Amino acid sequence: KLNDLENAVSSLLLAKEIKLENVGGVVTHPEVGKTQNVLGVVYATNNQHREALICFQDALLVARIHSLEDDEHQDPEIQQILRNISMVRQDMQIQGGGYSNYNNNNNKCNVCRCLLYHFRTAGARRCHRH
């Protein structure tokens, strides 16, 4: 499983690099922001919450720049990223900055499981929008 997560991070970093090349290095391009959000989910799944938080904050900046909503509370992409940030911060605060919020039953991080659930359900609807 660790190799899968490491491969996912490597693949996403490569995808981000390719996207940046294709958009002329514009780091605020919506596709780059989406990749940052996915990368944040993978980092959170791998219990790398500080890295996840950085990715989510980058994704939030991009989403705010490109939001079509006057009120960010009405933008589902922004709201999802804010929930991701909140969950990661909460986990870090509970653990005193640590990375282990495990459920003894299945040895999977509860916060990460929640992030992945929201990403899968919301992400599936968003991917066809752009």
Image (cartoon, rainbow, N blue to C red):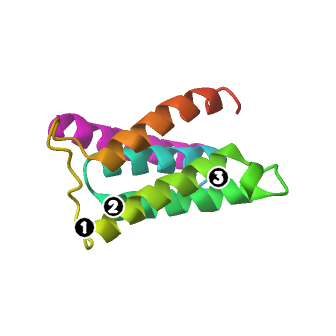
Residue under label 2:
91
Q: Is residue 60 left or right of residue 86?
A: right
Q: Amino acid at mark 1?
A: Gln
User: Dominant secondary structure of the magenta stretch?
Assistant: helix
Query: In the rendered structure, does residue 74 fall within the stretch colored magenta?
Result: no
Nearest the viewer among 130 and 119 is 119
**In terms of image quadrants, where is residue 1?**
top left
Q: Nearer the viewer, mark 3 or mark 2?
A: 2
In the rendered structure, are the residues bearing label 1 and label 3 in contact, judged by CB atoms less than 8 Å apart? no
Q: Is residue 120 left or right of residue 10?
A: right
Precedes in sequence: disc 1 or disc 3 = 3
Nearest the viewer among 20 and 84 is 84
Query: In the rendered structure, does residue 11 fall within the stretch colored magenta?
Result: yes
Residue under label 1:
95
Residues drawn in magenta: 1-23
Q: Amino acid at mark 2?
A: Asp
Q: Residue at x 41, y 38 (%)?
A: 116
Q: Residue at x 42, y 44 (%)?
A: 115
Location of the C terminus (image quadrant): top right
Q: Is residue 82 left or right of residue 95?
A: right
Give the distance between the C-alpha atoms of the residues marked 3 and 2, in whole angstroms.
20 Å
Relative image position of residue 129 (x, y in whole percent): 71, 30
At label 3, counting other C-alpha atoms closer than 10 Å, the crowd grade (few under 14, some 14-19, many 20 or more) is many
Q: Is residue 115 visible?
A: yes
Residue under label 3:
78
Q: Residue at x 15, y 37 (%)?
A: 105
Q: Secondary structure at mark 1?
A: loop
Q: Secondary structure at mark 3?
A: helix
In the rendered structure, are the residues bearing label 2 and label 1 in contact, judged by CB atoms less than 8 Å apart? yes
